[in-house]
Amino acid sequence: MTPRTVTVRVPAKVNTQLSVGPARPDGFHDLANVFLAVALHDTVTVTPADDLRITCTGPDAAQVPLDRTNLAARAAELLAARHGIEPRVHIHIDKDIPVAGGMAGGSADAAGALLACDALWGTGASQSQLLDICAELGSDVPFSLVGGAALGTGRGERLTPLEVGGTFHWVFAVADGGLSTPAVYREFDRLTPDAPEPAAAPALLDALRTGDAKALAATLTNDLQAPALSLRPSLAETLAAGTAAGALAALVSGSGPTTAFLCADAEAAHQVAAALTASGTCRAARATTSPAPGATVLTD
Ligand SMILES: C[C@](O)(CO)[C@H](O)COP(=O)(O)OP(=O)(O)OC[C@H]1O[C@@H](n2ccc(N)nc2=O)[C@H](O)[C@@H]1O
Ligand SMILES: Nc1ncnc2c1ncn2[C@@H]1O[C@H](COP(=O)(O)OP(=O)(O)OP(=O)(O)O)[C@@H](O)[C@H]1O
Protein backbone atom coordinates (compact mmCIF):
# COMPACT_ATOMS: atom_id res chain seq x y z
CA MET A 1 0.00 0.00 0.00
CA THR A 2 1.28 3.52 -0.80
CA PRO A 3 2.09 5.36 2.44
CA ARG A 4 0.13 8.57 3.15
CA THR A 5 2.82 10.38 5.10
CA VAL A 6 6.57 9.86 5.24
CA THR A 7 8.96 11.48 7.72
CA VAL A 8 12.71 11.55 7.19
CA ARG A 9 15.39 12.78 9.59
CA VAL A 10 18.55 14.32 8.09
CA PRO A 11 21.78 15.43 9.80
CA ALA A 12 23.90 18.58 9.56
CA LYS A 13 27.58 18.33 8.64
CA VAL A 14 30.92 19.72 9.66
CA ASN A 15 33.94 19.72 7.33
CA THR A 16 36.93 18.26 9.17
CA GLN A 17 39.13 19.07 6.19
CA LEU A 18 38.09 21.53 3.53
CA SER A 19 40.90 22.03 1.04
CA VAL A 20 39.97 24.26 -1.89
CA GLY A 21 41.71 24.36 -5.26
CA PRO A 22 41.64 27.11 -7.88
CA ALA A 23 38.33 28.19 -9.44
CA ARG A 24 37.36 25.90 -12.36
CA PRO A 25 36.04 27.19 -15.69
CA ASP A 26 32.48 26.36 -14.51
CA GLY A 27 32.95 28.59 -11.43
CA PHE A 28 33.13 25.72 -8.94
CA HIS A 29 36.26 24.71 -7.04
CA ASP A 30 37.77 21.24 -6.82
CA LEU A 31 37.84 20.14 -3.20
CA ALA A 32 39.28 17.62 -0.80
CA ASN A 33 36.26 17.77 1.47
CA VAL A 34 36.22 15.45 4.48
CA PHE A 35 32.60 15.52 5.62
CA LEU A 36 31.42 14.33 9.03
CA ALA A 37 27.69 14.18 9.81
CA VAL A 38 26.70 15.57 13.22
CA ALA A 39 23.62 14.83 15.31
CA LEU A 40 21.79 18.13 14.70
CA HIS A 41 18.83 17.34 12.47
CA ASP A 42 16.09 18.70 10.27
CA THR A 43 12.97 16.57 9.92
CA VAL A 44 11.14 16.51 6.58
CA THR A 45 7.56 15.22 6.37
CA VAL A 46 5.77 14.73 3.05
CA THR A 47 2.01 14.29 2.58
CA PRO A 48 -0.02 14.07 -0.65
CA ALA A 49 -1.55 17.47 -1.58
CA ASP A 50 -3.26 19.23 -4.51
CA ASP A 51 -0.05 21.04 -5.44
CA LEU A 52 3.56 21.43 -4.31
CA ARG A 53 3.51 23.32 -1.01
CA ILE A 54 6.22 23.99 1.58
CA THR A 55 5.88 24.89 5.25
CA CYS A 56 8.63 25.29 7.83
CA THR A 57 8.84 25.51 11.60
CA GLY A 58 11.80 26.06 13.91
CA PRO A 59 13.86 28.98 15.28
CA ASP A 60 15.19 30.06 11.83
CA ALA A 61 11.97 29.30 9.89
CA ALA A 62 11.46 32.95 8.87
CA GLN A 63 14.69 32.81 6.79
CA VAL A 64 13.64 29.74 4.80
CA PRO A 65 12.10 30.38 1.35
CA LEU A 66 8.67 28.74 1.00
CA ASP A 67 8.53 28.95 -2.79
CA ARG A 68 10.02 26.67 -5.42
CA THR A 69 13.51 28.00 -4.78
CA ASN A 70 13.49 25.91 -1.59
CA LEU A 71 15.95 23.08 -2.21
CA ALA A 72 13.44 20.55 -0.83
CA ALA A 73 10.87 21.67 -3.44
CA ARG A 74 13.48 21.38 -6.18
CA ALA A 75 14.30 17.86 -5.01
CA ALA A 76 10.63 16.82 -5.22
CA GLU A 77 10.29 18.42 -8.67
CA LEU A 78 13.40 16.69 -10.02
CA LEU A 79 12.36 13.26 -8.73
CA ALA A 80 8.84 13.73 -10.10
CA ALA A 81 10.16 14.86 -13.51
CA ARG A 82 12.43 11.79 -13.72
CA HIS A 83 9.42 9.55 -13.18
CA GLY A 84 6.92 11.50 -15.31
CA ILE A 85 4.63 12.37 -12.39
CA GLU A 86 3.37 15.64 -10.90
CA PRO A 87 4.99 16.74 -7.61
CA ARG A 88 1.70 17.07 -5.73
CA VAL A 89 3.03 17.07 -2.22
CA HIS A 90 3.06 19.10 0.96
CA ILE A 91 6.62 19.21 2.32
CA HIS A 92 6.93 20.24 5.94
CA ILE A 93 10.41 21.04 7.27
CA ASP A 94 10.98 21.10 11.01
CA LYS A 95 14.26 22.99 10.99
CA ASP A 96 16.84 22.68 13.72
CA ILE A 97 19.94 23.19 11.52
CA PRO A 98 21.03 26.85 11.40
CA VAL A 99 20.12 28.56 8.09
CA ALA A 100 23.02 29.78 5.90
CA GLY A 101 25.32 28.60 8.68
CA GLY A 102 27.75 26.41 6.73
CA MET A 103 26.18 23.22 8.08
CA ALA A 104 24.38 22.18 4.87
CA GLY A 105 20.85 22.80 6.19
CA GLY A 106 19.27 23.37 2.79
CA SER A 107 21.15 20.36 1.43
CA ALA A 108 19.81 18.24 4.30
CA ASP A 109 16.25 19.27 3.44
CA ALA A 110 16.82 18.43 -0.22
CA ALA A 111 18.15 14.95 0.60
CA GLY A 112 15.34 14.42 3.11
CA ALA A 113 12.61 15.49 0.67
CA LEU A 114 14.08 13.28 -2.04
CA LEU A 115 14.12 10.16 0.14
CA ALA A 116 10.68 10.95 1.58
CA CYS A 117 9.06 11.56 -1.84
CA ASP A 118 10.67 8.41 -3.22
CA ALA A 119 8.97 6.44 -0.42
CA LEU A 120 5.66 8.34 -0.69
CA TRP A 121 5.38 7.95 -4.46
CA GLY A 122 6.84 4.44 -4.55
CA THR A 123 9.25 5.55 -7.29
CA GLY A 124 11.79 3.01 -6.05
CA ALA A 125 14.85 4.97 -7.23
CA SER A 126 18.16 3.21 -6.62
CA GLN A 127 20.76 4.74 -4.31
CA SER A 128 22.85 5.71 -7.33
CA GLN A 129 19.85 7.39 -9.05
CA LEU A 130 19.13 9.29 -5.82
CA LEU A 131 22.80 10.33 -5.58
CA ASP A 132 22.71 11.63 -9.18
CA ILE A 133 19.71 13.82 -8.36
CA CYS A 134 21.43 14.97 -5.16
CA ALA A 135 24.52 16.04 -7.14
CA GLU A 136 22.31 18.04 -9.51
CA LEU A 137 20.74 19.84 -6.53
CA GLY A 138 24.01 20.92 -4.89
CA SER A 139 27.55 19.89 -4.02
CA ASP A 140 26.74 19.04 -0.37
CA VAL A 141 23.46 17.18 -1.05
CA PRO A 142 24.92 13.70 -1.79
CA PHE A 143 26.66 13.70 1.59
CA SER A 144 23.43 14.70 3.39
CA LEU A 145 21.85 11.56 1.93
CA VAL A 146 24.62 9.15 3.00
CA GLY A 147 25.84 10.73 6.28
CA GLY A 148 28.53 9.11 8.43
CA ALA A 149 31.88 10.34 7.15
CA ALA A 150 33.07 10.65 3.56
CA LEU A 151 35.72 12.23 1.38
CA GLY A 152 34.13 14.48 -1.23
CA THR A 153 36.16 15.19 -4.34
CA GLY A 154 35.29 17.04 -7.54
CA ARG A 155 33.11 19.91 -6.28
CA GLY A 156 32.41 17.74 -3.21
CA GLU A 157 29.73 15.57 -4.81
CA ARG A 158 31.90 12.48 -5.53
CA LEU A 159 31.94 10.53 -2.29
CA THR A 160 34.17 7.86 -0.82
CA PRO A 161 32.87 6.58 2.53
CA LEU A 162 35.30 6.81 5.45
CA GLU A 163 35.61 4.74 8.59
CA VAL A 164 35.14 6.47 11.96
CA GLY A 165 36.49 4.65 15.03
CA GLY A 166 34.63 6.42 17.82
CA THR A 167 32.31 9.22 18.90
CA PHE A 168 33.54 12.82 18.63
CA HIS A 169 32.08 15.57 20.83
CA TRP A 170 31.43 18.99 19.28
CA VAL A 171 29.96 22.34 20.14
CA PHE A 172 28.52 24.56 17.39
CA ALA A 173 28.23 28.28 18.01
CA VAL A 174 25.47 29.81 15.90
CA ALA A 175 26.13 33.37 14.71
CA ASP A 176 23.61 36.11 14.01
CA GLY A 177 22.80 36.17 10.30
CA GLY A 178 24.28 33.97 7.59
CA LEU A 179 27.15 34.08 5.10
CA SER A 180 26.63 33.49 1.39
CA THR A 181 28.55 30.40 0.21
CA PRO A 182 29.40 31.91 -3.24
CA ALA A 183 30.60 35.12 -1.54
CA VAL A 184 32.93 33.12 0.75
CA TYR A 185 34.35 31.20 -2.25
CA ARG A 186 34.87 34.52 -4.09
CA GLU A 187 36.73 35.88 -1.07
CA PHE A 188 38.85 32.70 -1.08
CA ASP A 189 39.79 33.41 -4.73
CA ARG A 190 40.72 36.99 -3.85
CA LEU A 191 42.88 35.93 -0.88
CA THR A 192 44.42 32.82 -2.53
CA PRO A 193 45.44 33.56 -6.12
CA ASP A 194 47.66 30.44 -6.42
CA ALA A 195 45.71 27.72 -4.60
CA PRO A 196 47.34 24.27 -4.99
CA GLU A 197 45.34 21.21 -6.09
CA PRO A 198 43.62 19.84 -2.97
CA ALA A 199 44.37 16.41 -1.45
CA ALA A 200 43.03 14.57 1.61
CA ALA A 201 45.46 14.58 4.57
CA PRO A 202 46.44 11.01 5.61
CA ALA A 203 46.91 12.08 9.28
CA LEU A 204 43.33 13.37 9.42
CA LEU A 205 41.92 10.19 7.89
CA ASP A 206 43.92 8.19 10.47
CA ALA A 207 42.52 10.30 13.32
CA LEU A 208 38.96 9.64 12.11
CA ARG A 209 39.64 5.93 11.69
CA THR A 210 41.08 5.59 15.21
CA GLY A 211 38.50 7.88 16.84
CA ASP A 212 41.33 9.93 18.40
CA ALA A 213 39.94 13.39 19.26
CA LYS A 214 43.34 14.94 20.07
CA ALA A 215 44.80 13.73 16.78
CA LEU A 216 41.74 14.98 14.91
CA ALA A 217 42.03 18.36 16.66
CA ALA A 218 45.63 18.65 15.45
CA THR A 219 44.67 17.96 11.83
CA LEU A 220 41.40 19.94 11.32
CA THR A 221 41.71 22.49 8.50
CA ASN A 222 39.33 24.72 6.59
CA ASP A 223 40.53 26.80 3.63
CA LEU A 224 37.28 28.82 3.84
CA GLN A 225 38.09 29.95 7.38
CA ALA A 226 40.30 32.90 6.34
CA PRO A 227 37.75 34.19 3.80
CA ALA A 228 34.88 33.74 6.28
CA LEU A 229 36.87 35.68 8.91
CA SER A 230 37.70 38.34 6.35
CA LEU A 231 33.98 38.82 5.65
CA ARG A 232 32.98 38.47 9.34
CA PRO A 233 35.97 39.46 11.56
CA SER A 234 33.92 39.12 14.77
CA LEU A 235 34.03 35.31 14.40
CA ALA A 236 37.62 35.46 15.74
CA GLU A 237 36.15 36.39 19.14
CA THR A 238 33.88 33.33 19.13
CA LEU A 239 36.81 31.07 18.18
CA ALA A 240 38.93 32.55 20.98
CA ALA A 241 36.12 32.16 23.55
CA GLY A 242 35.73 28.45 22.76
CA THR A 243 39.47 27.84 22.86
CA ALA A 244 39.76 29.64 26.21
CA ALA A 245 36.94 27.43 27.55
CA GLY A 246 38.98 24.28 26.84
CA ALA A 247 38.04 23.14 23.33
CA LEU A 248 40.71 20.94 21.72
CA ALA A 249 40.27 22.87 18.46
CA ALA A 250 38.15 25.68 17.06
CA LEU A 251 37.33 26.32 13.41
CA VAL A 252 34.77 27.87 11.12
CA SER A 253 32.20 25.28 9.98
CA GLY A 254 32.29 25.05 6.17
CA SER A 255 31.58 28.49 4.69
CA GLY A 256 30.48 29.81 8.14
CA PRO A 257 29.44 31.76 10.06
CA THR A 258 28.73 28.85 12.44
CA THR A 259 31.90 27.96 14.37
CA ALA A 260 32.77 24.41 15.47
CA PHE A 261 34.63 23.31 18.61
CA LEU A 262 36.00 19.81 19.01
CA CYS A 263 36.02 18.71 22.67
CA ALA A 264 37.64 15.83 24.59
CA ASP A 265 34.36 14.36 25.91
CA ALA A 266 30.70 15.14 26.63
CA GLU A 267 31.49 16.96 29.88
CA ALA A 268 34.04 19.23 28.20
CA ALA A 269 31.52 19.92 25.42
CA HIS A 270 28.89 21.02 27.95
CA GLN A 271 31.42 23.34 29.63
CA VAL A 272 32.47 24.85 26.31
CA ALA A 273 28.81 25.33 25.29
CA ALA A 274 28.03 27.08 28.59
CA ALA A 275 31.11 29.32 28.29
CA LEU A 276 30.28 30.25 24.69
CA THR A 277 26.70 31.10 25.63
CA ALA A 278 27.93 33.26 28.54
CA SER A 279 30.59 34.96 26.35
CA GLY A 280 28.01 36.89 24.34
CA THR A 281 30.02 36.19 21.17
CA CYS A 282 27.34 34.00 19.55
CA ARG A 283 23.56 33.65 19.36
CA ALA A 284 23.46 30.09 20.72
CA ALA A 285 25.80 27.18 21.41
CA ARG A 286 24.81 23.55 20.88
CA ALA A 287 26.67 20.45 22.10
CA THR A 288 26.35 17.36 19.91
CA THR A 289 28.19 14.29 18.64
CA SER A 290 29.42 12.69 15.42
CA PRO A 291 29.21 10.65 13.31
CA ALA A 292 25.47 10.53 12.61
CA PRO A 293 23.58 8.44 10.06
CA GLY A 294 22.44 10.01 6.78
CA ALA A 295 18.84 10.64 5.72
CA THR A 296 16.68 8.06 7.49
CA VAL A 297 12.98 7.27 7.04
CA LEU A 298 11.34 7.47 10.50
CA THR A 299 7.71 6.68 9.67
CA ASP A 300 5.63 5.69 6.71
C1 LIG B 1 31.19 25.09 1.65
C2 LIG B 1 30.58 23.71 1.53
O1 LIG B 1 29.41 23.65 2.33
C3 LIG B 1 31.57 22.67 2.05
O2 LIG B 1 30.99 21.41 2.20
C4 LIG B 1 30.25 23.38 0.07
O3 LIG B 1 31.38 23.43 -0.76
C5 LIG B 1 29.13 24.22 -0.50
O4 LIG B 1 28.22 23.33 -1.03
P1 LIG B 1 26.75 23.80 -1.53
O5 LIG B 1 26.21 24.81 -0.58
O6 LIG B 1 25.99 22.52 -1.78
O7 LIG B 1 27.12 24.53 -2.85
P2 LIG B 1 26.42 24.54 -4.30
O8 LIG B 1 24.96 24.80 -4.11
O9 LIG B 1 26.82 23.34 -5.07
O10 LIG B 1 27.12 25.80 -4.93
C6 LIG B 1 26.86 27.10 -4.46
C7 LIG B 1 27.99 28.01 -4.88
O11 LIG B 1 29.15 27.74 -4.06
C8 LIG B 1 30.34 27.81 -4.83
N1 LIG B 1 31.01 26.50 -4.81
C9 LIG B 1 30.41 25.41 -4.26
C10 LIG B 1 31.06 24.18 -4.23
C11 LIG B 1 32.36 24.11 -4.80
N2 LIG B 1 33.04 22.96 -4.82
N3 LIG B 1 32.94 25.21 -5.35
C12 LIG B 1 32.29 26.40 -5.35
O12 LIG B 1 32.83 27.39 -5.83
C13 LIG B 1 29.91 28.25 -6.23
O13 LIG B 1 29.97 29.66 -6.22
C14 LIG B 1 28.46 27.79 -6.29
O14 LIG B 1 27.71 28.56 -7.21
N1 LIG C 1 15.36 24.10 2.71
C1 LIG C 1 16.14 25.20 2.89
N2 LIG C 1 16.60 25.50 4.12
C2 LIG C 1 17.38 26.59 4.28
N3 LIG C 1 17.73 27.43 3.32
C3 LIG C 1 17.31 27.17 2.08
C4 LIG C 1 16.50 26.04 1.81
N4 LIG C 1 16.25 26.02 0.51
C5 LIG C 1 16.87 27.09 -0.02
N5 LIG C 1 17.50 27.81 0.91
C6 LIG C 1 18.31 29.04 0.66
O1 LIG C 1 19.68 28.65 0.72
C7 LIG C 1 20.47 29.59 1.44
C8 LIG C 1 21.58 28.81 2.15
O2 LIG C 1 21.00 28.05 3.18
P1 LIG C 1 21.68 26.79 3.87
O3 LIG C 1 21.08 26.71 5.24
O4 LIG C 1 21.60 25.61 3.00
O5 LIG C 1 23.18 27.29 3.95
P2 LIG C 1 24.48 26.57 4.41
O6 LIG C 1 24.18 25.68 5.55
O7 LIG C 1 25.51 27.64 4.60
O8 LIG C 1 24.86 25.68 3.16
P3 LIG C 1 26.22 24.91 2.88
O9 LIG C 1 26.83 24.52 4.17
O10 LIG C 1 25.72 23.70 2.08
O11 LIG C 1 27.03 25.86 2.07
C9 LIG C 1 19.48 30.27 2.39
O12 LIG C 1 19.83 31.59 2.63
C10 LIG C 1 18.13 30.16 1.68
O13 LIG C 1 17.83 31.32 0.98
Image (spheres, rainbow, N blue to C red):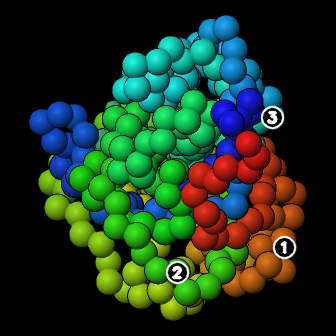
Do tag 3 and tag 2 residues touch (Cβ < 8 Å)?
no
The span from disc 3 to disc 2 (Cα, nearest Å) is: 31 Å
The span from disc 2 to disc 1 (Cα, nearest Å) is: 25 Å
| Kind of residue at badge 3 | Pro
Spot occupied by residue 253 in the image (x, y as percentages of width and height)? 54, 55
The span from disc 3 to disc 1 (Cα, nearest Å) is: 23 Å
Q: Is residue 122 above or below residue 35?
A: above
Work out whether residue 274 or residue 122 is closer to the camera in this orientation and state it.
Answer: 122
Q: Where, by quadrant of the figure, is residue 98 drawn?
A: top right
Ranked by sequence position, the earlier of labels 3 and 2 is: 3
Q: Is residue 10 above or below residue 79?
A: below
| Kind of residue at badge 1 | Gln
Q: Nearer the viewer, mark 3 or mark 1?
A: 3
| Kind of residue at badge 2 | Val
Do tag 3 and tag 1 residues touch (Cβ < 8 Å)?
no
Categorize mark 3 by other alpha carbons within 10 Å: few (<14), some (14-19), many (20+): few
Residue found at x 69% / y 61%:
39
Residue for badge 2: 164
Residue for badge 1: 271
Instruction: Report the residue that reaches farthest toward the top.
Output: 50
Work out whether residue 230 or residue 292 is closer to the camera in this orientation and state it.
Answer: 292
Residue found at x 38% / y 37%:
133
Residue found at x 12% / y 36%:
25
Spot occupied by residue 93 in the image (x, y as percentages of width and height)? 71, 32
Residue for badge 3: 59
The answer to whether the residue bearing label 2 lies less than 8 angstroms from the nearest atom of ligand 1 is: no
